[in-house]
Image: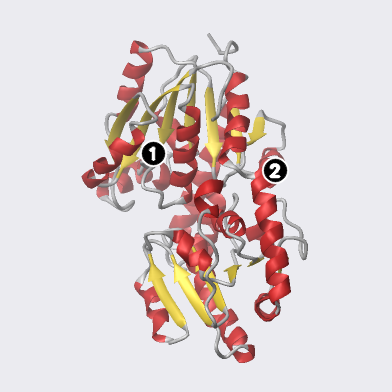
Amino acid sequence: MYYVLNSMKILMLTPYLPYPLVSGGQIRTYNLLKALSAKHDITLFALIKDESEREHLSELKKYCSKIILFKRTRHPFVLRNILLAGFTAYPFVVTRNLPLGMAAAIQKELSSSTYDLIHAETFYMMPNIPETKIPIILAEQTIEYLGYQDYMKKANPLLRPLLAIDVAKIKYWERFYWKKADKLITMSEDDKQFIEKELGVKINISVVANGVDLAYFSAVKKKLPKDPTVLFVGTFKWLPNKEAVEEIVTKIWPLIKQKLPYAKLKIVGFSPTQRIQSFAVDPSIEMLGAIKDIRTAFATSHMLLAPIRSGKGTRYKVLEAMITGTPVVATPLAAEGIDLTHEKNVLIAESVAELARESVRLLKNHKLQQFLGEAGRILVERSYSWEGITRDLDAVYQEFKHNDKK
């Protein structure tokens, strides 16, 4: 059981409903809500894209004293968002997350109840917060403008000038809210150092990493198939995951197959595009899409391959693989933010050829699989449990218990 010394009344703002556990953001927020609610009184203001999401409220009501939902657009490029992005200083990622009535509802809530703290997940929720003396904590799960910048560079050349303007807006407002918040939370020390270097000044930043439900993922034991099996996991609404699976199938997998003709590749994740689904025409590739229990994918795979090359933050796929005893081959960026060391608890490689070579070496060496699998499991148990992560977040909360701006 998790305990805190001082109970606080917290208003939490999220750009998604923190259930079901589909995306990394949902996983993080749900587990933090679950642990923090033991002592804190939490009101949740969340955005939804579809009314059907309301069916999940019963799960969240266990942990929140009040939940208020607001409808955002399902797709970013609708007329309202285009006009707001075109005729205001805000980028699309902000205008999409500015639902009608939310700012007024937050103002009313702050006027009618006494809050100790406002906790905003992602910078693009910040414009919904009215001027207030209540301390504001901003949690940045990733550094948004970097992802959009990568997308812009790879987009149709005719669209790049427009996208470049939007990226510049994202960068401006992200930096603006980093400085405006009373406290900034990053997922890793790497992200913290990046932001401090980016701003050129020291600001109030704490690292509160991502975690794993140890009991849940440890409950399923390995049932490895005869054929060497590689796993890729990722939500395919996120561009870095689309790029990673494309690289695996078109560049890395052919090299692995040359050395291991009977190897199998499993692709798991929500919202696969038609392009990603088409990879399954290769009989060595199994496209599972969204599966009911992700643990079964880890249990039946010899290794996880994570060639992530853009985006910031820590990767749930890596932490979840390690707690299940599944060894990992990853790019340096995929391993960033986790206390990983090449050959000690992970295999790290950069180029396509190196990633393929390390994968083949791992798949051929059962002792190495066992060694890395056990080392990864021990690391996650020691440093990345939600109980420990929640203690870190509560320590940040307690800084403001009697130290607000009133």
What secondary structure is marked by label 2?
helix
Q: Quadrant of the N terminus?
A: top right
Q: Quadrant of residue 174?
A: top right
State left or right for residue 157 relative to residue 400: left
Task: Kindly identify which numbered label has been placed on residue 189.
Answer: 2
Is residue 154 visible from the viewing direction of this image?
A: no
Q: Quadrant of residue 72?
A: top left
Amino acid beneath label 1: Thr
Amino acid beneath label 2: Glu
What secondary structure is marked by label 1?
loop
Residue placed under numbered mark 1 in the picture: 88
Residue in view at x 33 percent, y 38 percent: 59
Q: Is the Cβ of the residue at disc 1 closer than 8 Å to that at disc 2?
A: no
Spatial separation of the CA atoms under disc 1 and disc 2: 34 Å
- Residue 402: x and y in percent read 58, 10
Residue in view at x 50 percent, y 74 percent: 246
Is residue 115 visible from the viewing direction of this image?
A: yes
Task: Kindly identify which numbered label has been placed on residue 37.
Answer: none
